[in-house]
């Protein structure tokens, strides 16, 4: 049974899915995930996010898929006279835990990003906005329930 489970590891596409598989193997050996050991990974595919929500994986890093939206927002501002050259923005990945995984699964399960109001991240549309915050954790924090 262990040999078969180990062979399945190579079928996973993301590290978090891989860690989820390890968690399954170890839990069959009586070792409790996130108590006796912790797992983490990268990539916010649905299976990985579900693994975080289910407690099989402690956290995963990701959020890089939103970069295109932020580029369009910066271009929109620049086209409307807001020079973002003076605003340094470093794209950082966000760490997803169980709470953010629950929200992510609720709002992003269908890959539909139309519910996000991107104008709230624009300095042109929000004259009082002092700095850009394109972190995915900021998006998740600002999604209305």
Image (tube, rainbow, N blue to C red):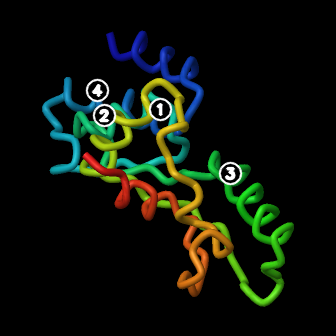
Is the residue marked by circle 1 packed among few (<14), some (14-19), or many (20+) residues within 10 Å?
Answer: many
* Left or right: residue 141 compared with residue 16: left
For the point 28% across and 26% down, the residue is: 24
Give percent across and percent down for residue 7: 50, 15
| Crowd class of label 3 (few under 14; some 14 to 19; many from 20; radius 10 Å) | few
Earlier sequence position, callout 3 versus callout 4:
4
Q: Marks 2 and 4: CB-CB under 8 Å? A: yes
Contact (Cβ within 8 Å) of mark 4 with mark 1: no
| Residue for point 86% across, 67% down | 79
Q: Few, some or many C-alpha atoms within 10 Å of disc 2 (few <14, some 14-19, many ≥20)?
A: many
Where residue 37 appears, as percent x and y from the top left, is: 25, 50
Picture quarter containing residue 104? top left
Which residue is pictured at 58% across the width and 60% down the height? 119
Image position, residue 89 (x, y; %): 69, 77
Instruction: Quote the CA–CA distance across marks 1 and 2.
Output: 9 Å
User: What whole-number distance in Å separates the C-alpha atoms at marks 4 and 1?
Assistant: 10 Å
Reading the image, the residue beneath label 2 is 23
Q: Which residue is mark 4?
A: 24
**Cα–Cα span, label 3 and label 2:** 34 Å
Mark 2: secondary structure: helix
- Of marks 3 and 1, the one in the foreground: 3
Q: Quadrant of the N terminus?
A: top left
- Which element is circle 3 on? helix
Q: Residue at x 69, y 54 (%)?
A: 67
Real-space Cα separation, disc 3 to disc 1, in angstroms: 29 Å
């Amino acid at each position: 049974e262990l040999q078969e489970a180990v062979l399945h590891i190579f079928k996973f596409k993301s590290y978090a899915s891989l860690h989820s598989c390890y968690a399954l193997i170890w839990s069959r050996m009586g070792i409790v995930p996130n108590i006796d050991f912790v797992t983490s990974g990268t990539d916010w595919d649905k299976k990985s996010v579900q693994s975080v929500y289910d407690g099989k994986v402690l956290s995963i890093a990701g959020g890089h898929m939103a970069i295109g939206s932020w580029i369009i927002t910066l271009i929109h501002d620049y086209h409307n006279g807001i020079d973002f050259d003076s605003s340094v923005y470093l794209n950082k990945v966000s760490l997803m835990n169980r709470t953010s995984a629950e929200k992510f699964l609720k709002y992003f399960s269908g890959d539909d990003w139309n519910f996000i109001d991107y104008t709230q991240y624009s300095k042109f549309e929000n004259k009082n906005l002092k700095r850009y915050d394109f972190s995915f954790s900021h998006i998740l924090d600002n999604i209305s329930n």
